[in-house]
Image (cartoon, rainbow, N blue to C red):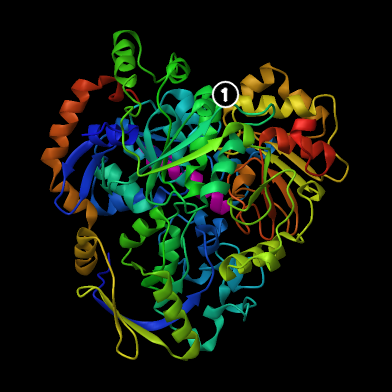
Amino acid sequence: MSGQTLYDKLWQSHLVEQRDDGSALIYIDRQLIHEVTSPQAFEGLRIAGRQPWRVDANFAVPDHNVPTEREERSGGVAGITDAVSRLQVQTLDDNCRDFKILEFQINDVRQGIVHVVGPEQGVTLPGMTIVCGDSHTSTHGALGALAHGIGTSEVEHVMATQCLLQQKMKNMLVCVKGQLQAGITAKDVVLAIIGEIGTAGGTGYAIEFGGEVVRALSMEGRMTICNMAIEAGARAGMIAVDETTVEYVKGRPFAPRGAQWDQAVVAWRELHSDPDAHFDRIVELRGADIKPQVTWGTSPEMVLPVDGVIPDPALMDNAAQREATERALHYMGLTAGMLITDIKLDTVFIGSCTNSRIEDLRAAAAVVKGKKIAATVKRALVVPGSGQIKQQAEAEGLDKIFTAAGMEWREPGCSMCLAMNSDKLGAGEHCASTSNRNFEGRQGFGGRTHLVSPAMAAAAAVAGHFVDIRDW
Amino acid sequence: MKSFTVLQGIAAPMDRANVDTDLIIPKQFLKSIKRSGFGPNLFDEVRYLDQGEPGQDCSGRPLNMDFPLNQARYQGAGVLLARENFGCGSSREHAPWALEDYGLRCIIAPSFADIFYNNCFKNGILPIVLDTQVVDHLFAQMYATEGYELKIDLARQVVQTPAGEEISFDVDTFRKHCLLNGLDDIALTLESAAAIRAYEQRWRKQSPWLFDVIR
């Protein structure tokens, strides 16, 4: 019998009941809750007269709707201008109070994007099963956990039963070998992976990311990669536990201490795939081949190296691909044959659960230090992922670097990644964005998103168009 | 949950690959704390010519007449024919809520994104995966025939075309059972409460740091 993959181990250790039809009841250690996908679940509990199975397995924080402008933010929930958003955030506060669930409220310094706050606080730990009504829950897999997004019915199901009914996924290994070129980041790596396997390439799989490149990444970088597993179609992405993981978790507020810490570390050291584990699919990339990546279209798989040229649909044999390309070019206002570096930007957004951690902000600040954003760039937002990151960045003077360059320094939240608050793109605007989705309308009706790394976004802000960060 | 047994309905097209859940229901409508009323905003950005806002009366909004669901021949559609990777992106269950509220109870496509696929079954919607060639064939027939209706029989696991042609499909046994009977998942899982408690006790002993910390 061959060994087990990391996913096999996490699955096995959480298996409550295996059923004859192939489905299984899986125990869930943590449920992360935010304001958008939870109200209907709480309502469901109330209607059925149910209580949460285990209150201490749940943790909540509002992030999607919260304003990021200081003035609006300073008024707390009552200060949210948009009445519909205000009600949703208020409803989360009310539900958490009624069901006694720990919540970091809007102006708690620990508040932030749920996928940033979970690892930062030690709410999410290696070896756990973690769910949240948000597809970017895959982020937490970077800690050697099984983490994935679920719908609201399942949010209610986990609240009521502490379990999920699941079918086991297949195993995929994405191995990034060797070393990266200078200036290439985790974001470029994951965009290159999506470019390689496509936006549905990981459907039905749990993806483990490995190889020297992944091993050499910081936890921040690993979270960036796992975050976007879903953009390759995989609900869950994960990375084996190593010294980097253990060091990251140590001392976090909700992480174990003392004898429990020692016991936990022993267990966590087993969280890797066995050498003879079987993967249903293996994809290999050479780190040295990865260039800075820029998406040009309306799906994350529509991605090119920065020295690339916008594709020509007329040269495509496949009719579906040709139509999709034509539609994307039309929506994005781009023409075949144009250079990526000729795309001019109106807006720059540095933030989101993909790239709003301290390392991301440092990388962006290093690029804009002592420079000004281009006169043609109307807006450049920097939105830290949490209050703690904001404090850390301010202690390092990063906020001053951004504001001196003409960028806006905001309060933490999801912000323009999905534009549920007032941070939106105008129709036709091109945005260099460190977020995760370039879908039509994602950042605002008619908005045109280009996904890039924080350093690439910062350089584009200064130049007014995309530039190769390797030449910066 | 509404049960799903046999559905006969007009088929309408969503003829593009990688239809994401942002397209199915744009983010501004996710601010609602209800689970109903999303139908008028299904496919909002391609269905209307203006930008929709939550709480707005959609009856007077300018329609994009190039969008099939706005065309007379597809009115009252119950089945959506779609392409690869339908429902990719965000996990928002508002997507199936909007489809169901509009009246679409069955989606046929060559492939679906995992989370969306799963969310459908929780809301009385049947997602059916058929080979690309078969989906192509259904698209061609639908475009050629005004009022084209498909009949979906879940118990027998067949899609029937107007010509009487029967196409069988796969569906997970448990999900089929729940859908046919409109069963509440939670009540079913709670039948295993003893097994959950037994597991929990073992797990707590093995990993005590996972318990009683978050409060």
Using residue A286 as the reference point, say whether residue A470 is left or right of it: right
Seen from the viewer's position, the closer of residues A84 and A156 is: A156
Other-residue count near label 1 (Cα within 10 Å), few / some / many at <14 / 14–19 / ≥20 = many
Residue at the far right in the pictured view: A375
Residue at the far left in the pictured view: B194
Using residue B146 as the reference point, say whether residue A170 is left or right of it: left
**Magenta stretch, residue numbers:** A83-97
Q: Residue A222's x, y, as percent?
A: 51, 30
Q: Does residue A245 lie above or below A349 as drawn?
A: above
**Residue A93 part of the magenta segment:** yes
Residue at image coords 21%, 38%: A15
- Res A26 quadrant in image: top left
Q: Quadrant of the N terminus of chain A?
A: top left
Residue at the far top in the pictured view: A258
Residue at image coords 68%, 38%: A292
**Residue B89 part of the magenta segment:** no
Residue under circle 1?
A: A388
Q: Chain letter of disc 1? A: A
Seen from the viewer's position, the closer of residues B38 and A293 is: A293
Q: Does residue A338 lie above or below A461 as drawn?
A: below
